[in-house]
Amino acid sequence: MNSINKWLSCLLVCLPVLMLAQQQLYKEASLVKGTDTLNYRILWPDNFSEDQVYPLVLFLHGAGERGSDNEAQLIHGSSLFAAVENRAEFPAIVIFPQCPRDDYWSNVDVDRSGEGVKLEFHPEKTPTTALSLVMELLSEQLDKSYVDKDRVYVAGLSMGGMGTFEILGRMPQTFAAAIPICGGGSDDLVEKYAQVPMWVFHGAKDDVVNPLYSLEMVEALLEAGGYPNFTLYENARHNSWDSAFAEPEFLPWLFSKTRTPKN
């Protein structure tokens, strides 16, 4: 019992230190468009040079990390890209935008009145302000000479998994690969991006976002001629991102993909 208490005490001490380290590696920035502001953090490759070309990763956080502190979005996933060995093997530009508290990455009605959430997606509507700003930010980055236009990736968890599916539908020619985790989306636009390599993750015991939402998207992708990877963790609940980030092939798979532009 004493060893467990010591471990917990160490964890409580170490977590703030780890978060501070992430905050120092990921530089603060913001995009201002009229009266709207998108805060984000950006991780640059070691020894970054504008004369080199780098892949770009866009990572969309979950609903619990919304806000304006420009820090909370780094809680999940940032350490994976910032690990010394991963930065050495996969030098990339990694962007973690933060969704404001009163907004959402996806245009979706979220009903939390019952067990879990019920989702109704609206692909026919314009993107939310938050996603519109993300798309603006991404477009700005794509204009940079040092961004490899054929190696642009998007990933996200929970609300960010929904945002991943949505931004694929709204920018279908942009991404070389995508990883939506414990999310969901509308199958109305799937045909536009079915050929984008995807690795979909979900927990079978997820009591927040039902795994059927991911299953439905995988089914739609298959029907549209896509060939998605799909991992359903037998014992994982909503935090299936922990298992996903622990996959040895998570980053090798992602960075191995190259976009094939359509004529």
Image: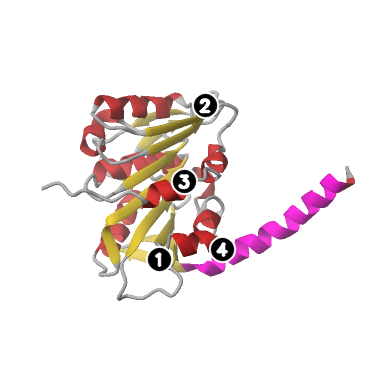
Q: Give the colouring mode of the picture.
A: secondary structure
| Residue 96 lies within the magenta run | no
Against 143, residue 191 (above or below) is above
Residue 69 seen in render? no
| Residue 6 lies within the magenta run | yes
Could you tell me the amino acid type at mark 2?
A: Ser
Could you tell me the amino acid type at mark 4?
A: Gln
Of labels 1 and 2, the one closer to you: 1
Of labels 4 and 2, the one closer to you: 4
On the image, which quarter does residue 180 sit in?
top left
Name the residue at 46% across, 71% down.
46
Point out which mark residue 250 bears.
Answer: 3
What residue sits right under mark 4 in the picture?
A: 22
1 and 3 marks in contact (CB < 8 Å): no
What residue sits right under mark 2 in the picture?
A: 113
Could you tell me the amino acid type at mark 1?
A: Ser
Query: Separation of disc 1 and disc 2 at Cα?
Result: 34 Å
Instruction: Give the prevailing secondary structure in the magenta stretch.
Output: helix
Against 91, residue 103 (above or below) is above
Name the residue at 30% across, 67% down.
53
Tell me if mark 2 has few (under 14), some (14-19) or many (20+) residues whose alpha carbon lies within 10 angstroms of its own.
few
